[in-house]
Amino acid sequence: MRQPLLRLDGLTKAYPGVLANDDISFEIGIGQMHALLGENGAGKSTLVKMIYGLVKPDRGTMTLRGADYAPAQPSEARRNGVAMVFQHFSLFDALDVAENVALGMENPPPLRDLARRIREVSTAYGLPLDPNRLVGDLSAGERQRVEIVRCLLQEPKLLIMDEPTSVLTPQEVEVLFRTLRQLSAEGTAILYISHKLDEIRALCDEATILRGGRKVATCDPREKSARELAELMVGQVLTPPERPAKPKGAALLQVRNLSLTSNNPFGTSLKDISFTLHAGEVLGIAGVAGNGQDELLLVLSGEVPTGADQVQLKGAPIGHLGPNARRKRGLVAAPEERLGHAAAPDMSLTENALLSAAQRKRLARSGFIDWKATDRFAREIIAKFDVRTPGPDVLARALSGGNLQKFVIGREIELAPDVIVVNQPTWGVDAAAASFIRQALLDMANRGAGVVVISQDLDELLELADSFAALNEGRMTPVRPAKGLSVDEIGLMMGGAHDMTPAQGVSA
Amino acid sequence: MIRLEKRKEPSTFWRIANPFLAVALTMIAGGLMFAALGKDPIAAIRLIFFDPIFSAQFGSFSRPQLLIKSAPLILIAIGLAIGFKANIWNIGAEGQYIIGALFGAGVALAFFPAPGWYIFPLMVLAGAFGGFLWAMIPAILKTRFNTNEILVSLLLVYVAERILAAMALGLMRNPDVAGFPGSRDLRRYEAAHNAELIAGTGIHWGVVAALIAVIFAYAMMTRHMLGYHIKLAGQAPRAARFGGVSPARLVVICLGISGALAGLAGMFEVSGPAGQVRIEFASGYGFTAIIVAFLGRLNPLGIVLAGLLLGLTYIGGELAQMMLQLPGASIQVFQGMLLFFLLALDFQTNYRLRLTKGARI
């Protein structure tokens, strides 16, 4: 047994209506890689926020290296050697790497010295970074390096990482893991939050599993199968979605030589994209965030029109049509950002049901809204997709992310389209709901619809897709059959142009 | 220490209570202002808010005035509120009001002295069209060149005022009265006169139009896709685009509707209560209507109440000017305070104040 670094004793935190953490105790040893596993809402973030000084526990104590530890705020946690890399980066696009690092430090040294330190530390840990580059020009993987290097400069004893691989290609993940192993060997403990079980089994030597705010188990993840871990996490037996073999159908959606210049300086321009989607086919489009996924969705949904022939539905040109005209013809879309794009935050679920359904569900007659039918439709989605809400009059922003996701995906599926395009369909959704959404998408394909799934979750794509392509800096690889693709091949498709090998990326 | 905390959901209670609270605070602050001017504050407040309706001495004159003053305010505010809901800020209703009046009066003067039932309806159409045209200038500049409609519509008010002056002194001047600026009195031209419909009530065609506008706006905002799209665009522009709303089309529609309604208000005013095109025709209805729209919470029924209240301050202000020799500007200060207090109070719809013990660093 290693020497303990941090001990948690009966940590409890209640918010109005929920017990986020209930009597949680475990230990993290010096240099240990400790996984924290759990579904959304299991209490992982509350727990690490307490360790990082963002939230005060109601009850319970923490001991760090034998001394009482009760950080009142993050700066105190950092002084004690606890650092954290958040899932969402807090970086400024228009500043360079060194400036961004300086902003997050208590007493930053002069920028010249800092730049030198960044070079040293980042090279020492195999995460090369050029301190003079603008953050806006960096890939998601490189941005994460900035956050990690910022933490490493403080020489932490405990590094908390929140879902660090959700934005990385498999190759980038390898690089990151090497760094983490090196840190661990030097005595830095790592608290690794994830729900990707294979990663945890590859990386961590102890795992604590949370469910509904309680600790279910502390175990060695390498001694359990991924399935056993998942069932501990979810508390029920999981069935993978079914996918009967089927012949290729007629061409439904065709995209031809599509190029589009982004009007956002840090957006991605689409470059010469072509593909064909057939009836009954699920096309999975992989890619690291920010490689043109959002732009592709806007072009397919009709929010950004293109030349008429560049997008064709069932042989008819629709590239010039807006979203409603496309819906009428049978093409619907569900964007990634649910609050503010797929749904209006300050409108009720009933009002949000109308957002994309007015045409196909005939909820308006000569412009006049049938609120009764709309309300019925909203209730239907809520019931069918198990949206947890007191009723359809609740504002969209009052729902949890996962519940709202079920609502907006459910809304599009209920429109019974010929083609559905979804971006990150199960992002932030708990495992049970995610498998329900995936099954619903597969059912659509089985009924003869075409499905385009844009996702950063490779496991999801491999589970769903018949054919597979990847986006990279606005270019799309040729579509390949998903069967028989190895993770390595996928990684190369996704990351071809990214300089993710440790030797590159640093100017001498 | 006081801390601000964002509410999870906007408070419905404060949303409804704030307009009333704002009126109360305005009365208190206004009373203090009158006291500082050496007037009896209670008498002044009474004169402004109660006497126009309840006093036996002034009531018979003031009561019909209430509808005459409120109708244009309501008509303009209804149009503005539709745009405000979509985050399209037409601040230049005063200009559209003037141009609408000039178009309406222009039709009347062109037909003078011919009789005919069709003249007044033509004037109505011309008035709405004039306001619509004037509002299309900021609309098209915004959709073509991405200019700011607040600035453009506001500056066009001053252009409209110059045109009004030029018309009163030149093209539209009454040729029969040498030397005096101002057009013929439309009240004496029967085919063009927007007369009182029921004697002693102040109800003229403008009041009827305001009522119709309220009903239409209510139906549109609650039952029609256009109203839904307007709200959507105001609250979540990206969701609106996903819902198939074209932002440019919405700018044209919202500015068009508010311009046409302001133009109508101007036309009903020039052919009735004002009677003629004069340099001092514009009396600030277009600006006061902004206060009416906000005080009425951008809700058609709320706007009716707010319009009546602001109409009351116009009449009461004149009364107080006459009886207490209050300066004429004090009523504008009064109206300004009302908007000021309302906006300040609205802060607590979305935030709550928290007193915390001791400072935490």
Image (cartoon, rainbow, N blue to C red):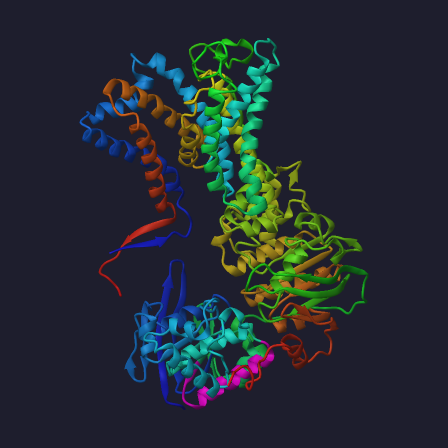
x and y percent of residue A282 in the render?
A: 72, 65
Report the residue at 49% width, 87% height from top.
A181
Question: Looking at the picture, does residue A68 appear above or below residue B158?
Answer: below
Left or right: residue A147 versus residue A352 is: left
Left or right: residue A279 versus residue A200 is: right
Q: Main secondary structure of the magenta part?
A: helix
Residue A375 visible within the image = yes
Q: Which residues are magenta?
A: A169-190
Say which of A496 and A216 sits in front.
A496
Q: Is residue A173 magenta?
A: yes
Residue A255 lies in quadrant: bottom right
Q: Is residue B106 magenta?
A: no
Say which of B125 and A111 sits in front.
A111
Question: Looking at the picture, does residue B32 appear above or below residue A188?
Answer: above
Report the residue at 37% width, 16% height from top.
B63
Residue B337 lies in quadrant: top left
Report the residue at 45% width, 87% height from top.
A184
Residue at the left extreme of this rendering: B38
Question: Looking at the picture, does residue A301 appear above or below residue B70?
Answer: below
Residue B207 visible within the image = no
x and y percent of residue B226 in the render?
A: 59, 39
Say which of B136 and A410 sits in front.
B136
x and y percent of residue B355 in the render?
A: 26, 54
How many numbered marks, from 0 up? 0
* Quarter in which the N terminus of chain A is drawn: bottom left
x and y percent of residue A479 in the render?
A: 74, 71
